[in-house]
Amino acid sequence: MTDTAKFALDGKEFEYPVMSGSVGPDVVDIRKLYAQTGAFTYDPGFTSTASCRSALTYIDGDEGVLLHRGYPIGELAEQSSFMEVAYLLLNGELPSADELQTFNTTITRHTMVHEQLAAFFRGFRRDAHPMAIMCGVVGALSAFYHDSTDIHDPVQRTIASHRLIAKIPTIAAMAHKYSVGQPFLYPDNSLSYTGNFLRMTFGVPAEPYEVNPAVERAMDRIFILHADHEQNASTSTVRLAGSSGANPFACIAAGIACLWGPAHGGANEAALNMLREIGTPERIPEFIARAKDKNDPFRLMGFGHRVYKNYDPRATVMQKTVREVFDALKVNDPLFETALRLEEIALSDDYFIEKKLFPNVDFYSGVILSAIGFPTEMFTVLFALARTVGWVAQWNEMITDPDQKIGRPRQLYTGPTQRSYVPVAER
């Protein structure tokens, strides 16, 4: 017999079925709550509300677990590639060698963007934030690719998914090139997904660009670690936009807009800015003391996580990657010395251990991206590049979900009750 949850209101009792997933907390199915009771639930931020069924990503914040289609994030980041993870999220299983080769070829064939799109960039000021450009250009893709906007056609959905995953790195690199006044580089189909992005971002037409293997691997890991993260704000935005029947390009543009918010996609930039404020390792004790002072507004950015109440499983991989990148690029900068020393102190200080303020993925990724040469305004763009895979997978899952309905949250109204209009002359 299915478990039920009992709900009492105004002296009446109601029962609602309890649903269980393959792992994780049970959920109470309250879809009939309003019809039966005339009452809504109140859940600001939807932190206790399951908005959908999903078979993509599972997070256990208390245990520090992150699974993509059942595979631990650490194993994927260490042993897999971003293209393999993209295939996994889209299709549910890891690809065979032939399937991966076909998928790689398909994505590679879609990396170029319509030539007229280059003219679109010139409508922005040179000092425009790259995320502003990303919002506009990705949304504009629907004006160029009319043959993949019918969301009811599975073939068109697949083509749109491949196009988005393939073109996002090209658009991101173009946003960077535009901001620094350099010419756009066409994709090079002989390179990997990540290597191609690095070349389009840092290469110039005047000389050949050689991809650094350590940097390529580090970027691939960063992309894997940011590929999907369950029903976060931007993913929920993509699903909400998609629930109205909007085309996939518009939905991903909506996700990019949400990710731009500093509370969501800007954490690694905030962590790096904090390290710059600290300056040198000698000043760390001063800032540690400020972080412990309840009366001081200073907060250590890049430590702790809203979801992970234990160690961020993505940070374990990034901790190792920091050192690999530093060694490969022969980094010698007080900023990076400060980061490594702060990490060491935080992992051994009783205050941080007691409050579980461990370094998270944003602490490490900002440091790595800066060492590679990305300006801080590109950090969120890179996040969007990686997360596009998850957004696209979530969007496809939502479209085929028989329970899917247009998103329509309710509210607790606190404004005036009904009143009569008074003509302006009588007010």
Image: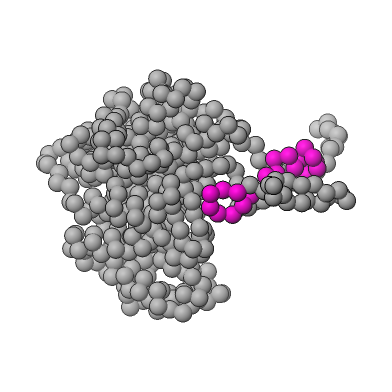
Report the front residue among 266 and 49: 49
Q: Is residue 37 magenta?
A: yes
Residue found at x 53% / y 38%: 239
Vertical side of 24 occupied by 198: above or below: above
Report the front residue among 22 and 224: 22
Q: Position of residue 290 (x, y in %)?
A: 47, 75
Report the front residue among 417 and 350: 350
Q: Position of residue 297 (x, y in %)?
A: 52, 69
Magenta highlight: main SS: loop
In this rendering, position of residue 249 left or right of residue 17: left
Residues rendered magenta in the picture: 20-39
Residue found at x 30% / y 49%: 80
Tell me where residue 314 sits by quadrant.
Answer: bottom left
Residue found at x 20% / y 34%: 189
User: Which quadrant, please, contains the C terminus?
Assistant: top right
Tell me where residue 367 sits by quadrant.
Answer: bottom left
Query: Which residue in the rendered view is the most extreme toward the left?
Result: 207
